[in-house]
Each structure stands twice: as C-alpha cells, then as structure tokens.
Amino acid sequence: MREKLKKLSPLWTALAAVALAGAIAFAVLVGAGVSAAGARDPFPVPAASGAVRMAEDDAYFVAADAEGELSCYNKTDGTLLFSYRKPTAEDSGGGADVLNVSLYDGQVFALYSDRQVLRFAADGGGVPAGALETNYVPQKAYFPASGNLFAVYGIVGSRKEVYLLRTDFGGTPAAPVSYREYPKLDGGEYAVSSGGVETGVQGICVAEDGYVYVASDIYTVRRFTANGMEDGYEQYDIPAQKLAAFCETETGFAGMDLAGNFYRFDDTFQTEYTLRIGQAGRVVGVRSDEGVLFNIAAEGDSLVLARGNAFVLSGGGDARYIGVALARRQASFAGLLSLYIPLLVVFALFAVFAGLHAWRPLGARVNRGLAVCGKTFVKHKLAYIGLIPTFALLAVFYYWPIVRGFGLSFFNYNGVTSQFVGLQNFVDVLKNTIFWNSTLNMFILLVTDLVKAIVPPLIFAEFILAVRSKRFSFIVRVLLFIPGILPGVAGTLVWVNGIFGSDSYGLLNSICSLFVPGFMQTWIGPYLETRSLVSIIMFSFPWVGSYLIFYGGVMGIPKSLFEAAELDGCGWWRRMATIDLPLIFAQIKYIFITSFIASVQDYGRLFITDQSTGHGLKVPALIIYESIYKGGSEPNYGLSSAMSMFLFVFLLAATILSFRKQTSKEEL
C-alpha cells in the first residue's frame, strides 16, 4: 500500500482535482445557459390544445386551430364563450383557414385565407357581427390603444399592402361588405389603402393620433396619415433592420426586432436606449409595462396584443412566456457562454493532463512521449513549420465550417434568430421520406459516375498508348481535352436543350426522325423520372474526362515490363489486367475517391436541368440546398445542417474504409 502511495504525486493529484472541479463547474454553467435559453415561465392564459393562432387581452383569450375552428374563452375562469367554423358552399362543416386572430375592445377579429375579415363580439355567441371582403390575402391586423381604426397587412400576388379599416364594419360572410364600396377615409368612410409599400413590411403601429407607422426591413419607419398615399408619408431612419413589433409609449415608441433587441425611441424615432434580451425564436415580443420586460417567443409570427403600454408576438401553437427574471438570466448567460465554453475545454484538457501525471509511472511515460515528440519536431522543424500554414487554412476554410455546421444542426436558425432545439432536426430528417427516397437517385448516379470516371478514360488511355504514330497520338489527346474547356453549366445546357431537346431541333430527335418521320420525344421532363434519369446519366458521353491521369500513369510504367510481357506471349488485354491496372492502382484510387465525393455532393446538374424541364428529380444534396433557399417563407439552416451531417458521416466512413483498404494492401 505504501509503495502505491509513493507512486502518487500529491501536487499533480491536487491540480487534477482542482481542474476537474473547474471543468464540472463550467459544464454546469454551460448546461444552465442552454437550459435557460429553452426555459419558459407558465403561460398566463389557458392556451387551447392544438392552437396555431392565439390572441389575448385583459378579459378574453381567443385561439384558432389548424382546422379553421375559432374558440373564444373567458380569461378569468377559462370558460368557453363560443366556437365558430367558417362555412363554405361546398362543405358546410368547414371553411377557410384562419391566418390570424386579434382581440380589440371586446371584439374578435379573424383574418381568413379566402380574403375575408370577420368581426365577432367576444360574448356574442359566435355570430359574426361584421364581414369585410378584401382584394388581398390578409396576414396581420394591428390595433391602436384606442380609436376606431385598425391596420391590416395583406399580400396581393408579389405586392405587399397595408390598409386602414374601421372597427365597426358590417356585412355577413354570405354578403360581405366590399372595400370597393367606400371611398378614402377623408370623408369618414370605411377603408383606405396606404398604397404599395415598396420595401418589405415588418411591424406596424396605429397611433392614437390617427397616424399609421410601417416599419420596413431596410432600417426605416414610414408614417402615413389616415388618407394613405394621398397625403404622402414621412420617413425616419432607425437602427433596427427588422422591427417586428413596436407600440406607443408616453414619450415615444418601444419596439422589438427579430434579432432579440429591445429599443426605446422618442417621438421622432431617435434611439434612447437598446437592450439585448437574447435570441429566443423566429419571432419575439416584449410586454413593456412601466419598465417591466417579458420576452415572448413562438414558432409563428402572429400578433397577439398591441396597445399603448404592451405588445406581444406569438403564434404557431407553442408560445413561450418569459418573465423579467428569466429574461435577465438568458441575457446574462448569452453573454457569458462564449467565455464558459473555452474555459470548460481548457479545464477539461488540463484535468486529463494532470490526471495522467498524478500516477508517477504513467506521468513518466507521458513525459517521455512528449520529449520524443519535441525532439522529432526540433529535428524536422522546417517540415512541421511548413505544414502550419496549410493546416491553418484548412482549419479556417474547412474544419471550422464542419464544426459550425454540426453546431447549427442543434438549432432552428433562419439567418437572423436562433433557437436551441436539441436533436429535433435529426428526428425531422429521419422522418423526412422525401430526403431518404432521394438517396436511391443518389446511389444510381454514384454507381454510374464511378463507372464513367474509371472505365472509359482508362480504356481510352490504353488505346492512345497503343497508337504508334506520335503525331496522331498528340492530335487525339488534344481533341479529347478540348471538351473539358467548356464550362460545366454551359455543357449541361447543351445536353439538356441541344442534344436531348424535346422539340424537332433536338439532336437526338433529329437523328431519330431520319428513320421514323415525324419522330418527337420528350427525353427530360415531368412525370418521366426513369427516362429523365437515364438521359442525365448520358451527359458528357463518351466520358473521357480523366483519361490524362491514367495516360500519365501508364506512361510511367517501365517499358521493360511491356517488352518482357510481349516476349512471354502476354496479349494486350491480359497485360492491361496483370501489369497496367496493379501499377496504376494509386491513380485509380484517386479518381475513385474524388469521383465518389463529387457525385454525392453534386446537385448542380439536377438543379439546372429542373429549371428548364421540371423533371422533379431529387438527391439529398439538392434537398439540402432547397431547404435553405427554396424552403418557404424563410430558410432553415438547422435542418439543412442536420441533413449535411448524414451525408458527412456517409462520406467520412466511405473515405476511411477506402484508405484502410489501401493501407492494408500496401502492408501486404
């Protein structure tokens, strides 16, 4: 026992214990920061199950589900006051989708996908008190602290419009009031258009004095009168690019942008102060009651409440309510995580190092290993120093994007806001049947790409080597190399529009029409998945792109081996199988690995051809691209990163397996 105790180093043992305690402490702090980012306080209203749109005021809570059913509750005791589902002529049991709901002055306002706005009395039993028909799809409604005007933001094709309506409009769903029946608001009528707002619309505020303020996504706020564009507008510059919500205060305005910044402005939108309360989701909002902040985050972007002293954004059925204490914790942890994580790594590494030295025999072995490494580095210092710039650039441009992509896969990130979701993105990928079904196309293209990259170029290289005329061999090599000069996109367009063109000018159709008069065939197009895939595989025929690498490899084989094989009666095919292929295995390996990776990552040919033909073929890499740039209203970098991780693991495993086989063969 005493001998064992002598082998323990008290100093290193103590240092290891301290470092381990520090690593555990910082791990707890990091975990607390992550937990705080996803924490929530109990929601102050009885949120209905399955609600995708919600609104509240002091007395009522209203929710709409995905089936278009509207429900209004008494906020005090949770009693259901009414339920309403919009009827249609085709189906009396269901109607249009509810795009947004609002509560104002004891009334419920519902915006529907069939371009109607319905008004209900909260305690009126669910009978519409008014129905207004618009010429746009209404998205959001914005109400003042008091008054009889409210703003509605809608979409007309690619245009974005903001309209100002009166809160007491009449009509019924069967015979709605039309905005066309009313002139502009200068005569006390019901509706007025603010005109086309050229920039993207973010938050809107209807002030008590009748002005309408519209925040754009280019750091500006425009002020309109009740007459809209008839009186023009006044523009203010602000520091917030996407001011998602703002409202009046006693001295000016308060607002929240999509990056989680809270602003206080004076009455001319000069910034009084800014407060960072953290990134909490796609859309965030704040209750601002006499300096009390409550951070609200949700998956959707519905406006729940907007009045003189408070506003909240919510929606998507999963609202998160965060009190001031939790908001301050989140803000504190958000600033300190960038410090906690590096310290956790440092303490953990030092704990391992000190732990190894706590046992003297093991520490001695570690020191000897470090000494050998140090001597080797000093002996070959020029070689190691020469590798530093290369690995530094690899770390910046290759390794860090991999680490960053892995980190993003645990978040919902749209380019502006970020929300930690854990493994949810990976679960969504596993459930994504479109992604996994596209792997079949990927493997078909992978196999054919490998065959095209190895077999034809190798045969052509052997044929060129067999040509005895040096002049003819030179001409053939130049002619084979010229197609490689053509840019890849241009070459793809030549094949899809020129060779496989679906009209009579397509080369393949023209050739076939020589034998079958009037022949015309669509080779790449919708609902022709198999034919389109085969046609795309034929691109770049006769596939001689990498022949120079094989030609150089075969040229490097000693001619004495060829002469000896010829004397032994070895034929050309047998010589290629027994001499050429084994001796140019390194070149074949290189082409195999690079073609393997390039094929799995390639989506350009399908993307380019789909733009003009609409064939609809997918591969995982293309789905990753589309989930960022064509995934709907906003990109989903987290889901794309999770998909990329599956491809990364597949490619990494294939590459490691390939190199291990090569190493085993070299050892033999």
Image: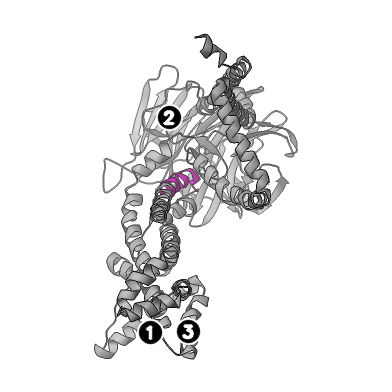
Q: Amino acid at mark 1?
A: Tyr
Q: Is residue 16 visible?
A: yes
Q: Amino acid at mark 3?
A: Leu
Discs 1/3, front:
3
Q: Quadrant of residue 294?
A: top right
Question: How many badges with numbers are in the image?
Answer: 3
Question: Under tag 3, what secondary structure?
Answer: helix
Which residue is the extreme one toward the top? 2
User: Neighbour class for label 2 at 10 Å: few (<14), some, many (≥20)?
Assistant: many
Residue placed most toward the observer, 462 or 330 = 462
What is the x, y in percent for residue 237? 72, 46
For the residues marked 2 and 1, what is the alpha-carbon distance in whole angstroms? 61 Å
> Which residue is label 1 attached to?
505
> Which residue is label 2 attached to?
62
User: Neighbour class for label 1 at 10 Å: few (<14), some, many (≥20)?
Assistant: some
Question: Under tag 2, what secondary structure?
Answer: strand
- Residue 552 is inside the magenta segment: no
